[in-house]
Amino acid sequence: MFRTIGIRNLFLAPFCIWAGIFIFVPLLFMFYYGLTTPAGNFTFENILMIFQTEFFYSLKMSVLLAFISTAVCLLLAYPLCLILVDRAKSAGAIITLLFILPLWMNSLLSTMAWQTILERDGTLNQILRLLSLPDFTLINTATAIVIGMVYNYLPYMVLPLYVALTKIDKSIIEAAKDLGANTWQTFYKIILPLSLPGAVSGITMVFIPALTTFAISALLGGGRILLIGNVIEQEFTFEYNWNLGAALSIVLMIFIVVNMALTVFFENSHEEEKN
Amino acid sequence: MISRLKTIYLAIIFLFLYAPIGVLIAQSFNESRYRGHWTGFSLKWYESLFQQDKIIDALQNTISIGILSAIISTILALITCLALREIGKNFRAMFMSVANIPILNADIVTGISLMLLFMGMGLKLGYGSILLAHIVFNVPYVMLCIMPQLMALDKSFYEAALDLGASPFKAFTSVVLPELRPSIVAGFLLAFTMSADDFIITYFTRGAGVHTLPTEIYAELKLGIHPEMYALSTLVFITVLIFVILFAMNRKKLLNQKEENF
């Protein structure tokens, strides 16, 4: 579309400059801060701080809660998407829109609304009392944080999974049924493997934000449960130890890179299988 | 039996998704300023909404940063995509992976690294730094929207226009641009949405005194949210809901028209 390669490169230049300044240099800054003392001397000490009891506990807790939330999202999303795809022809489009609509409410506000629902005299307990059922208080527990994570990130699981499921050729499923497969076999042998790429991108899209959040845990954990995101946020806004904060962010990046590598590896092996 | 189970399942998820929204809308009509204590129906938070300077300031910042960052990132993404179309497959894949770093990385890492960059460059944190940061994460979203449609575009129309004597610019604006319009509009809207909803990156790249709605909400959380914020969120939600309903109705109409034509 360009007369010469020179003109093409002229179009590419702004992005190259942009990516250099705003993608690579910031990461260099991060590594610089993470690997130096406040005086500017090279050190690994900041990174090794992650093995300190309280930091390591936060990291463990973050991985655990992110893992549980991802699993819950996956378990909720599969039946949901199967039902939505099934209804796609009739009212499906509108129902699907209704499931995306909550994204338009500010997520901090709706997370705070969960505080109102789950607290000791909250909406949930008031309803339970009306029905003469025993109270249960979930606020400031790990369960409340998981509820908040599932609420916030479920759409990120639903969307890729829904797209993957709509792409499956209906005749394959009918063929499986004609050949005598029951519902479970059809799901396990046909639908699951064919929708796996959607599920994998959904898992990444839920796991990474859940692992690194600090707002959800601050709102629903009541400051009792510090996730690794809260620790990093405090180092920057409260303790003013940027070197430590940057070092802990580098540790987080290791998780992200591993997660992405697994995704790419999975996608490649899936492509090869297809070929 | 099974179809009833399916409906019940949909209803439960539906309840889960809309329960907090119901609570927020109820709070916007609550007489009391304390959440969770219903003292009676009132519209006073809607009346005082426009006197809350902090909220209106944050709203203005959110909208103007959203629009500006969406425009700039759409232009940058379009120029880059045009060049990437004409480049080797491997190079293109490499460029796309670099472009995607800001959205694949965790928001907290992107936010902190940009903050360190701005501080290192001696840039004063404020409106400008938020705007730059939003362009950073918006460019890949717009590229993801434009690239597939641009790759599918048939180059021969553009070349035909050139052969017929159009200048490259004229050929581009009258042949390529109209073809790309749906994906450019989609990219722009996605960028605006992402910008308006972003909390974490804004939180780290904003300066003292400058707020967007999400950071204003987070700042208020500790002292208690101004109930006007619920009123504003309800208004935004209802507006989007109306648009969705209009879209759904028009879609049916459009589909019917299409069927009539065939």
Image (tube, coloured by chain):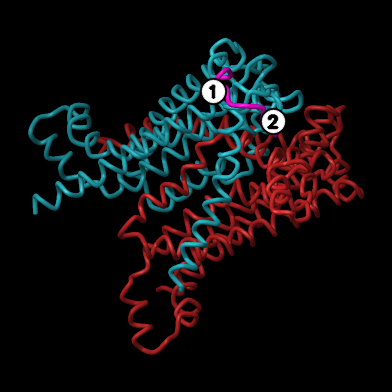
Chain colours: A red, B cyan
Q: Earlier in the sequence, mark 2 or mark 1?
A: 2
Specify the principal SS of the magenta part: loop
- Closer to the camera, A259 or B61? B61
Examine the image and state in which quarter residue A47 appears. Answer: top right
Residue B39 is covered by the magenta coloring: yes
Q: Which mark is residue B131?
A: 1
Residue labelled with disc 2: B35
Coordinates of residue B260 in the picture (x, y in percent)? 10, 51
Is A120 positioned to the left or the right of A66 in the image? right
User: Dot 2: what SS?
Assistant: loop
- Closer to the camera, B242 or A63? B242
- Closer to the camera, B192 or A19? B192
Q: Is residue A12 visible?
A: no
Which quadrant is the N terminus of chain A positioned in?
A: top left
Magenta span: B36-45
Examine the image and state in which quarter residue B77 appears. Answer: top left
Q: Residue at x 72, y 40 (%)?
A: A214
Q: Residue at x 59, y 11 (%)?
A: B53
Determine the chain carrying the residue at label 2. Answer: B
Coordinates of residue B41 in the picture (x, y in percent)? 58, 26
Is A225 positioned to the left or the right of B236 in the image? right
- For label 1, count other residues whose C-alpha is less than 10 Å away and answer few (under 14), some (14-19) or many (20+): many
Considering every residue shown, the one lying at the far right of the view is: A53
Coordinates of residue B22 in the picture (x, y in percent)? 56, 39
User: Dot 1: what SS?
Assistant: helix
Is A260 positioned to the left or the right of A125 in the image? left
**Callouts 2 and 1 on one subunit:** yes
The amino acid sitting under disc 2 is: Arg
